[in-house]
């Protein structure tokens, strides 16, 4: 019976050592830094900012037109038409912004998954969660994104 306890303890220690050897650890990523250094994300942000400026210019133009109207009826009709146009433009802008954000996120996520596999990590989490330890894979993800297929 004593040999059985020693054998069981040895198997438990061996299993723990094997599990520890197979566990690669946790990586972390600075998502903001990746976005700021990813050419696709930079271009997408520029596109969204350009659309935002177009919307602002639209509003300035409409304001000038409104001020040139001379009757309350014309002003009321103009306000109604402008409100409908603005709503449509604003919805299109929000759709574009959300679409670009989703595209960026999916591409960064795909590159991050590839880095996780290559580095044999168990997981990659946000750098905001890490207090101590882990492997910073931010630069590896940036490099992968700049190299191509995403």
Image (cartoon, rainbow, N blue to C red):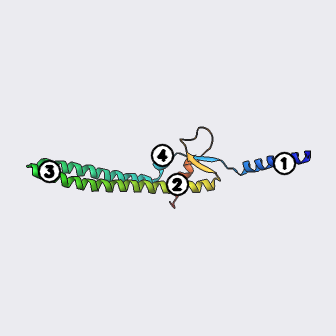
Q: Distance between the residues labelled 4 and 1?
A: 49 Å
Q: Where residue 147 sits in the image (x, y, percent)? A: 52, 58
- In front of the other: label 2 or label 1? 1
Which residue is label 3 attached to? 76
Q: Where residue 120 sits in the image (x, y, percent)? A: 65, 53
Q: In which quarter of the image is residue 95?
A: bottom left
Q: How far apart are marks 2 and 1 (CA)?
A: 43 Å
Q: Where residue 77 sits in the image (x, y, percent)? A: 14, 54
Residue 50: numbered disc = none
Comparing 108 with 95, the one in front is 95
Which residue is label 2 attached to? 109
Q: How far apart are marks 2 and 3 (CA)?
A: 49 Å
- In front of the other: label 2 or label 4? 2
Is disc 4 placed on a helix, strand or loop? helix
Q: How crowded is mark 2: few (under 14 residues within 10 Å), some or many (20 or more)?
A: some
Which residue is label 1 attached to? 8
Which residue is label 4 attached to? 32
| Left or right relative to 120: residue 71 | left
- In front of the other: label 4 or label 3? 3
Mark 4 or 3 closer to N-term?
4
- In front of the other: label 2 or label 3? 3
Comparing 51 with 18, the one in front is 18
Circles 2 and 1, Cβ within 8 Å, touching? The answer is: no
Is disc 2 placed on a helix, strand or loop? helix
Mark 1 or 3 closer to N-term?
1
Mark 4 or 1 closer to N-term?
1
Q: How crowded is mark 1: few (under 14 residues within 10 Å), some or many (20 or more)?
A: few
| Left or right relative to 25: residue 94 | left
């Amino acid at each position: 019976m004593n040999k059985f306890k020693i054998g069981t303890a040895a198997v438990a220690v061996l299993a723990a050592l094997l599990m520890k050897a197979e566990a690669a650890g946790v990586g972390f990523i600075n998502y903001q830094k990746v976005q700021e250094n990813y050419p696709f994300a930079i271009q997408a942000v520029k596109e969204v900012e350009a659309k935002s400026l177009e919307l602002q210019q639209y509003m300035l133009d409409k304001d000038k037109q409104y001020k040139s109207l001379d009757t309350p009826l014309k002003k009321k009709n103009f306000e109604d038409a402008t409100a409908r146009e603005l709503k449509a433009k604003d919805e299109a802008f929000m759709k574009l912004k959300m679409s670009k954000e989703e595209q960026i996120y999916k591409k960064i996520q795909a590159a991050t998954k590839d880095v996780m596999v290559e580095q044999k990590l168990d997981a990659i989490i946000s750098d905001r969660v890490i207090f101590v330890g882990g492997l910073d894979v931010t630069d590896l993800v940036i490099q992968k994104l700049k190299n191509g297929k995403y």
